Amino acid sequence: MLPEPEVCQRARKARDPRFDGRFIVGVLTTGIYCRPVCPARVPAEDNVRYFPTPAAAQDAGFRPCLRCRPETARRLPEWTLANDTVVRGLRLIDAGFLDTHPVEALAERLGITGRHLNRLFLDALKATPKSLARTRRVQLAKRLIDSSTLPLAEVALRAGFGSLRRFNDEMKEAYGRPPRELRRLRNAEPDADIVLQLPVRGPYHASWVFDFLEARALPGLEEVVEGEYRRALFHDGGRAGWLRVRWTGDGLEVSIPPAGITHLGDLLARVRRVFDLDSDPQAIEAVLLEDPLLADCIARNPGLRVPGAWDGYEIAVRAILGQQVSVARARDLAVRLCEQFGGGDFPPPATLAEADVSAIGMPGRRGEAVRTLSRAVLDGSLVLDESAEPEELTDALVRLPGIGPWTAGYIGMRVARDPDAFPDSDWVVLKVLGMKPAGSRDRSEAWRPWRAYAVMALWRLEGERRQRDAARTSPRTASKRRN
């Protein structure tokens, strides 16, 4: 996973932004670790060591640089890990799993022993899950210290620390100074939103992602207004305001109301998966550009992403509602579901497990599929989040009555974040390819392991065709009306 030393040397000397997040530079003479794009004077090669992660650098005794701020670096592309178990484990760690559970619980969730889990992480990242979780907490706390006026006790709580003493000890160990000395002054009102920058590995097709989310937004829960995505946050049973995300041209700016931050790590993990920030477009497009059907579309639309799920259960239910209907119709059904069974919010599994879902205007078999899915989530036999192993999730889904390959493939793309998920019976995919499902499966082999991104390109192709048709027919329609 760590690039060759010669590559690391050239990248850090050139301060190449393409390698930001791909490795960490530890400087022996200062005891500091930096991003390869750090603006500080470039140290001699004999005085540096390279690490795959900040956690590995901290375990080796280095402290984070206060100038280049490693906590704000781009994320490591998941494909570089080459181990699905490590990827799924990292996703859970990012969401704060180890803040409230022991490492053994994480191993059990992934279906392996704790000893094997530690071995996998050390091989891939040169750091244990426990070290990665500790570094992640420290980085989240540092961002809150720098970007908010929250009291330090609240910073500790919302970054995932179990106690203020633990917070003080870990921050001092990491930065060599207590949190109060790290606090920066800023011109912000005490109740102002907390604003964080999430860097993006470009290119990034922002308009595609925001348009995708806008077409599927549920009123009252989410919306896209003037290019800004908003999602309702809840705390203590009530609404705590809107999380807001906007594209700045080189990254995402996330604004969070202080009352809505119950756990910063979980919120940022949700934003990252909704906006698919952990993909590597250059690696993806290198494969898809080889296909003559997709090449022009990819060239015109660099940086297509697969928007993920804010909540896995919500997307799974909506996938069932969307079977064999248009996006607009599926959205209307989801709105009715919220109004009839959720009081305006998305209803939980316990509600839909016993509800007559078909009453919103859908076939009874599809309503029964929603109930069956909800019961499986309640009894724990179905886990709908990005830690799910894609093949196991697909098998579990298609065993449920009323859920077929298209629904399972769609959930795999958006919930499990499987880059190779492929809903082979998707109507748009079959139309653009001019094939039946069996033919589309064969045709998709050339796109592995990025078939989900190929689906986005096919959807984009169909959208462009519709726009061209509308542009051609619009003047004719207007002429007929004038005559």
Image (cartoon, rainbow, N blue to C red):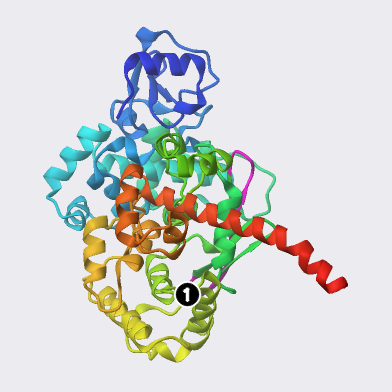
Is 234 on the left or on the right of 348, as rendered? Answer: right
Amino acid type at circle 1 is: Val
Q: In the picture shown, does residue 422 fall above or below 13?
A: below
Tell me the quarter of the image containing the N terminus: top left
Tell me the quarter of the image containing the C terminus: bottom right
- Residue 243 magenta-highlighted: yes
Residue 44 appears in the rendering: yes
Quadrant location of residue 118?
A: top left
Residue 79 on image: x %, y %:
33, 39
Quadrant location of residue 473?
A: bottom right
Residue 90 on image: x %, y %:
31, 46
Q: Residues within 10 Å of mark 1 (few under 14, many from 20)?
A: few
- Main secondary structure found in the magenta portion: strand
Residue drawn at the location 27% of the way across and 66% of the way down: 383
Residue drawn at the location 41% of the way across and 30% of the way down: 176
In this view of the protein, which residue sits in the foreground, 33 or 401?
Answer: 401
Residue 335 on image: x %, y %:
53, 79
The residue where tag 1 is placed is: 325
Write down the region rendered in magenta. 235-251
Residue 191 appears in the rendering: no
Q: In the picture shown, does residue 416 fall above or below 396?
A: above
Residue drawn at the location 49% of the way across and 37% of the way down: 201
In this view of the protein, which residue sits in the foreground, 330 or 71?
Answer: 330
Residue drawn at the location 42% of the way across and 48% of the way down: 454
Residue 406 on image: x %, y %:
35, 66
Is 422 on the left or on the right of 19, as rendered? Answer: left
Is 300 on the left or on the right of 79, as rendered? Answer: right
